[in-house]
Amino acid sequence: MSSGQLLSIRPEELTFEVELEKQAYCSAKVINNSEHYVAFKVKTTSPRKYLVRPTISVIQPWDTGIIMVTLQAQKELPPDLECKDKFLIQSIKLPPHLVFEDIPPDLFNKDDNKVIEECRLSVVYVPARSGIVKIEEESEDTDVRDPDMARRRRAEEALRRVREELDFTLQQNKLLQHEIEMLRSSSRSRTAASFSLRFAAIVGLIGVLIGMLLNLALYRRSAA
């Protein structure tokens, strides 16, 4: 676990099961160790290779969040799967007057008045487990000798991929729910502040409508 005073990141390495021309997925848990709202930003040394969601977010006090990272399909892999890519996660206490939608782009710019913590994560590539690649590398004689075994292996590999995609989808769903909750919580202050104004406007509008109806009723009565 990579840990600072504000945030802890788990795990310390982003591990991808890589396969040529196929996307790979990984996630990291972000844990807020403080009683403050903490904003974080994710950077990488290879931004074209990875899709990160979210790149900027806010974690509530003592809460957790999830960072989802997708490795784009690669046409070639490094020798011995050695990867030198790095990720940097910066974190800072969110000023009380700010809400999630109002995070300024320069919040993470370093100056003398800011305390920005940094956690670094390394990237590890590992071969895809068992799978179709190994099956295709086996001799055709094996398939001929035991076609049922080959079919079972292909079925197991397909099931594994479905499970991985399902896990990734579930993690994305949790992340989306967290982002929605953050947007809701950050907008509550605005909602509370503007509620009285909206209520007064609605009451005033109702009063105007009642006055118009009364005037219309008196007009009809006088005309009769």
Image (cartoon, rainbow, N blue to C red):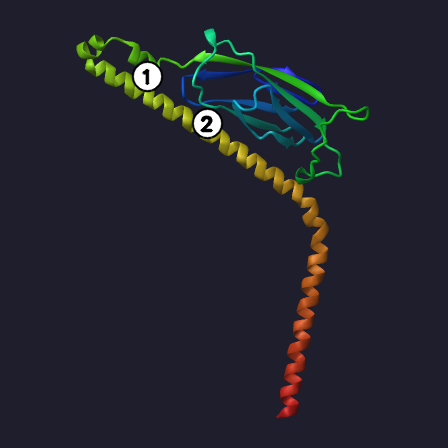
Establish if 19 lies above or below 192: above
Is residue 123 toward the left or the right of residue 128 in the image? right
Local SS, label 1: helix
Location of the C terminus by quadrant is bottom right
Sort mark 1 into few (<14), some (14-19) or many (20+) by Cα contacts within 10 Å: some
Q: Position of residue 171 (x, y in %)?
A: 49, 29
Q: Residue at x 24, y 15 (%)?
A: 150
Seen from the viewer's position, the closer of residues 157 and 77 is 77
Residue type (three-letter) at the residue carrying disc 2: Phe
Residue 84 seen in the current view: yes
Pick out the residue farthest to the left: 145
The residue at which mark 2 appears reads as: 168
Establish if 104 lies above or below 211: above
Q: Residue at x 59, y 28 (%)?
A: 65
Q: Nearer the viewer, mark 1 or mark 2?
A: 1
Residue 35 seen in the current view: no
Local SS, label 2: helix
The residue at which mark 1 appears reads as: 132
Q: Residue at x 32, y 16 (%)?
A: 132
Location of the N terminus by quadrant is top right
Residue type (three-letter) at the residue carrying disc 1: Ile
Is residue 147 toward the left or the right of residue 126 in the image? left
Cα separation, mark 1 vs mark 2, equals 20 Å
Is residue 171 toward the left or the right of residue 207 in the image? left
Sort mark 2 into few (<14), some (14-19) or many (20+) by Cα contacts within 10 Å: some
Pick out the residue farthest to the top: 80
Residue 85 quadrant = top right
